[in-house]
Amino acid sequence: MSLEKLSTDRQRDGERGSVLIMTALSMLLLILMVGLCIDISRIYTVRAELQNAADAAALTAAKELNGGDLGIDAAVTRANQIANSYGFGKGAVTISSITFARNLYPDTDYVSAATAKNNPANIRFVKVITGSASTAMLFASTALGPSWSENRQAVAGNSGIAPTTICDFFPAAVAIQFPLAAVGTVMPLKFNQGTGTAAVLAEKDYIILEVPDINGNGTGETAVLTAGIPNFCKKLGDNINMTPSSNKNNGPRNSGDGINTRFNDYANGYGNALQPNIYHPDANIREGITHEEYVNGSPITAPTTNTQWIEKDRRMLIMPIIMPNGAPPLQASYPSYTTGIQYWGLFFLKSKAYVENGNCSANPLCGAMTVELVSISPPLNPVVPTGESSSVTLPVIFR
């Protein structure tokens, strides 16, 4: 063997060793990166659960505020009860503090329940802060420590106080002709999915909205959206994005299935996602009544099952109102599926949405719901039926 060949063989042996080392280092780096992604995703899962618990507790507490001492006590009790329905594994979410204030800001004005009861008539907002939840780090302990702890908070109050911004509204835009229908008008709202390239909404059509916190807009996403999964905050004039994904092959039926959870009707499918402990039945599931009858509690049909999950006002839907399409001065279409919110509307859901099994493309009424217009914000209509309000007054999340 020549000296030249021997030298070449030794160089190749050295290169093989270098490749092995580089491969091992690359695999280690890949494993660490995957592990970091896993830990971060677990952090975000816990964070979302904490935020959902804080939102639900604050909303529930705000519903109990009635200007009296008992309303303060009931707010504290109900906030703790609702938070216990959220949790990780076998551990419930805890509440760190529940405080009250007359004004939304500043945070330093929020006081304890005992102090709030000294002047309960002025209490209009409630802030809920969850206890801290820890997530053990499996791979990211070097960067983030052995565990990651955090809590979340939410502030809720009556939407009539500042009606321009609404959170967790019903995720559908309604097209209503100007001048707007009078308060008390009963109207059928028909499902619309757009054309695939543009949204063309006729008078009293509704269309499902894109929600950034949800991945996808297929059958399951549409069902849980209309059932009431928390979405986002918007104010008058903000753009909203409509989705062409909830099409006639799935959208109307799935939208209706989500809507009908309010009537204690839970459709199968959707990964078993439509559950009464998450999407509660209304306290009165009687169909065909007026909003005034609903408010007065007569006539009433209470659910006979899932009674532990009953929630008042589930049939009250806050939706953004936009312009319908048509001849000028109406806009011809929404080519980018985007438009601004013109008004907020509060609607009473009179009856179940119409649904049928399978493809609904042959039935234009599939997914339609019948509602009564209760109020518009900002208020426009001078005609207000007896017992009704002229502004949106449901409790909502403000921050």
Image (tube, helix red, strand yellow):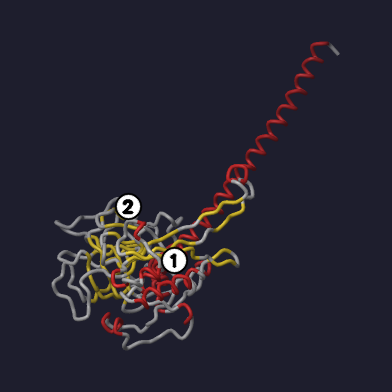
Q: Where residue 341 sits in the image (x, y, percent)?
A: 26, 58
Residue 160 image offset from top left, x and y in percent: 26, 67
The three-letter code of the residue at mark 1 reads: Val
Picture quadrant where residue 167 is located: bottom left
Q: Residues within 10 Å of mark 1 (few under 14, many from 20)?
A: many
Q: Earlier in the sequence, mark 1 or mark 2?
A: 2
Question: Which residue is at the far bottom?
Answer: 299
Q: CA distance from mark 1 to mark 2?
A: 25 Å
Q: Quadrant of the C terminus?
A: bottom left
Helix, strand or loop at label 1? It is helix
Q: Residue furthest top?
A: 3
Q: For this view, does 237 lie left or right of residue 328?
A: right
Disc 2 on helix, strand or loop? loop
Foreground mark, 1 or 2, reads 1
x%, y% of residue 105?
A: 32, 57
Residue assigned mark 2: 197
Question: Could you say which quadrant of the image residue 329 lies in?
Answer: bottom left
Asked whether residue 250 is in view, the answer is: no
Q: Quadrant of residue 102?
A: bottom left
Q: Which residue is mark 1?
A: 224
The quarter of the image holding the N terminus is: top right
Tell which of 51 and 377 is nearer to you.
51
- Compared to residue 13, the image places residue 139 above or below, namely below
